[in-house]
Structures are given as structure tokens and as C-alpha cells.
């Protein structure tokens, strides 16, 4: 029973069946699993897996690259809320100064509020520039019940989690490849073909050939060799694994190639080295994340790429 002036909010059941709502949930679950792949954590339900603070702790630590001083495992409700309090204080202290609106609380997250959890995750994904494409205008219909003068009053409101891509990306620079995905995704095959032609023009010097961008760059070997060819230097073989045999060696190669790119004057790649290794382990949309380095030499535009199993493509002039 509601007390006087108390209100209770519920999601209209049919709202959860909306295509954009389902897509948003799936994108966020896949993103969390991608970030936490090294932790061997697999999230299946946002409400059931995030309410106690354990996964949120690991997610924030990974994204923010910092360690939180909290108990690893807590079974009691008091312990779970204490952990949530610590985690959310750290999250809020990071987000609030950047102008983000806090639409969640310890009680709402622990109560498995879908609305609060989605607001939190969408905000984290946007703040940390997650390599995912959030669906536009994902929302749910809410039923709000209030008690006024002993009478229950009901109203219906729309709760939006995302806006337009332009508004969500307003804090960051959009680019030519974002426009390509938005307005001419069919042209992506043309871009891929051009990239393969460019890459092979250089890798052929080592008797190497690329036919599949999505798979042949995942272990970092071709990325390292391509950087050496483009920058005209020999990469010592002891600096990377020419025939990587496991996950760690592949991640090392990709990380090393990122360092070479930064040494060559490129911006730090937005992709994570671990992201290249997740194909086949996590069902992620198979698109490319490409970093383009412009250099005009004899009327030729040289392209330096990063192949990643992600949802966005970025262009750097």
C-alpha cells in the first residue's frame, strides 16, 4: 500500500517488447561482456546481474582504469548496498562534474529498476565513448501511480534513454565514416575494397596478402608489419609475436601496433586491443572500426587501419 504523497513507477509490459528497447538492452549487454571478457564475466540479464554491485564494480574499474576499495563478494543486502554505495559514489563523482544528469540511486539499482540501470549504462557508454551504436530514441512507457488525499492517481509518461545520434555524439566529433554508416551503409563494401587494395600494395612487399579485414588483422601481426612498411622502418621480431599462439600474445601485438601508431603521430585508437580478440566468443555486429591517417604522397591517400569487431567507424583527418 502506498503512503500519502508516495508514488510508484512501473513499466508498461508491452514497452519491453519494442524493437528499439530490445536492441538497446542487447547492445549494452554485448558491450559489458566485451569489456569484461578478461574477467570471465558473462551478463545475461541487466537487472539480475547488476543489482548487487559486483558487475558494476568490475565494469567501472575497467572503464576508468582504477581500483575501488570494496569487498569482492557480498551476500547480505546490507553488504550489497554498501558496495553499491561505494561504486555509485565513484561513478557519480566522475560523471557529475562533466555535466551528466544522475538518474539512478543505490535503492533503485538494488531494487532492479530497469529504468535506473539503463540510464546508468547508457551514460557510462556515452561518457567512455563505447565502440557501440546505441539505437536512437529508445524509450519505454511508464505508469506512475501516486496517492493524493487517500486517492490513487494514475498517469502515463514516456521515459527516453537515448536521443538522436547527433545529440548523443554532441560531446565528441562525428566524422565521415559515421555519416557513411548513417546514410550510405551500402557503400561500406566499396571502402573495404579500397582498404584491402591499399593494404596489399604494401604487405605484398613481404609476400603477404589480405582478403578479409575482419579476421586477418585481429591478432595484430599485419598491423605491426603495416606500420613498419608505412613508416619505413624494420620492427624487431622480439618486440611482437609473429605467430601468436594465445589470447595474451594477440592482445600484446595489437597493443604494440597502437603504440607504433601513436609514435607515428596518430591519435590514440578508440578501439581496445582486447576488442579485436572477441570474434567468435561474443556475438557482436561484424563491422569495422577504422582509423584513417591522411597523408598525401604523389596524389595518393595512404590509409592506416585498425580492424575491430565493433559498431562504429571513425575518420581522423
Image: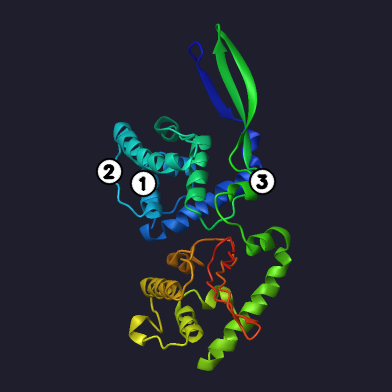
The x, y position of residue 117, in whole percent, is: 48, 39
Single out the residue that lies furthest toward the top.
149
Answer with left or right where residue 8 lies relative to residue 234: right
The x, y position of residue 193, in whole percent, is: 66, 78
Residue 309 in view (yes/no): yes
Residue 230 or residue 33, whichever sits in front: 230
- At mark 1, the secondary structure is helix
Residue 101 or residue 294, whichever sits in front: 294
- At mark 3, the secondary structure is helix
- At mark 2, the secondary structure is loop
Label 2 vs 3, first from the N-terminus: 3
The x, y position of residue 296, in whole percent, is: 61, 80
Discs 2, 1 touching: Cβ within 8 Å:
yes
Residue 245 or residue 136, whichever sits in front: 136
Answer with left or right where residue 240 lies relative to residue 31: left
| Relative vertical location of residue 302 with respect to residue 184 in this rendering, above or below | below
Mark 1 = which residue? 57
Answer with left or right where residue 77 lies relative to residue 100: left
Label 2 vs 1, first from the N-terminus: 1
- Distance in Å between CA atoms under marks 3 and 1: 29 Å
Given this view, does label 3 or label 1 mark the residue nearer the observer? Answer: 1
Mark 3 = which residue? 19
Mark 2 = which residue? 70
| Relative vertical location of residue 5 with respect to residue 250 in this rendering, above or below | above
Residue in the image at 53% along x and 93% along y: 205
| Relative vertical location of residue 165 with respect to residue 96 in this rendering, above or below | below
Neighbours of disc 3 within 10 Å: few (<14), some (14-19), many (20+)? few
Residue 210 in view (yes/no): no
Residue 218 or residue 97, whichever sits in front: 97
- Distance in Å between CA atoms under marks 2 and 1: 9 Å
The x, y position of residue 227, in whole percent, is: 48, 81
Amino acid at each position: 500500500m502506498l503512503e500519502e504523497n508516495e508514488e510508484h513507477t512501473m513499466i508498461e509490459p508491452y514497452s519491453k517488447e519494442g524493437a528499439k528497447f530490445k536492441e538497446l538492452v542487447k547492445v549494452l549487454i554485448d558491450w559489458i561482456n566485451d569489456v569484461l571478457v578478461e574477467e570471465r564475466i558473462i551478463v545475461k540479464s541487466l537487472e539480475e546481474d547488476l543489482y548487487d554491485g559486483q558487475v558494476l564494480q568490475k565494469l567501472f574499474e575497467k572503464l576508468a582504469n582504477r581500483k575501488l576499495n570494496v569487498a569482492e563478494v557480498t551476500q547480505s543486502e546490507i553488504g550489497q548496498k554498501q558496495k553499491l554505495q561505494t561504486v555509485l559514489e565513484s561513478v557519480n563523482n566522475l560523471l557529475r562534474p562533466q555535466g551528466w544528469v544522475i538518474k539512478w540511486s543505490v535503492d533503485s539499482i538494488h531494487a532492479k529498476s530497469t529504468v535506473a540501470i539503463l540510464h546508468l549504462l547508457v551514460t557510462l557508454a556515452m561518457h567512455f565513448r563505447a565502440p557501440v551504436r546505441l539505437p536512437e530514441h529508445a524509450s519505454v512507457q511508464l505508469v506512475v501511480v501516486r496517492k493524493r488525499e487517500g486517492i490513487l492517481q494514475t498517469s502515463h509518461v514516456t521515459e527516453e534513454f537515448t536521443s538522436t545520434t547527433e545529440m548523443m555524439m554532441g560531446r565528441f566529433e562525428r566524422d565521415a565514416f559515421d555519416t557513411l554508416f548513417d546514410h550510405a551503409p551500402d557503400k561500406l563494401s566499396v571502402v573495404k575494397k579500397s582498404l584491402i587494395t591499399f593494404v596489399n600494395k604494401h604487405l605484398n612487399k613481404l609476400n603477404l596478402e589480405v582478403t578479409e579485414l575482419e579476421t586477418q588483422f585481429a591478432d595484430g601481426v599485419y598491423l605491426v608489419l603495416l606500420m613498419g612498411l608505412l613508416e619505413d622502418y624494420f620492427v624487431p621480431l622480439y618486440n611482437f609475436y609473429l605467430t601468436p599462439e594465445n589470447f595474451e600474445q594477440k592482445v600484446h601485438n595489437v597493443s604494440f601496433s597502437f603504440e607504433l601508431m601513436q609514435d607515428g603521430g596518430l591519435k590514440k585508437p578508440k578501439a581496445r586491443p582486447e576488442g579485436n580478440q572477441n570474434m567468435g566468443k561474443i556475438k557482436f555486429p561484424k563491422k569495422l572500426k577504422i582509423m584513417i591517417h591522411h597523408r598525401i604522397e604523389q596524389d595518393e591517400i595512404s590509409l592506416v587501419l585498425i580492424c575491430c569487431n565493433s559498431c562504429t567507424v571513425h575518420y581522423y583527418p
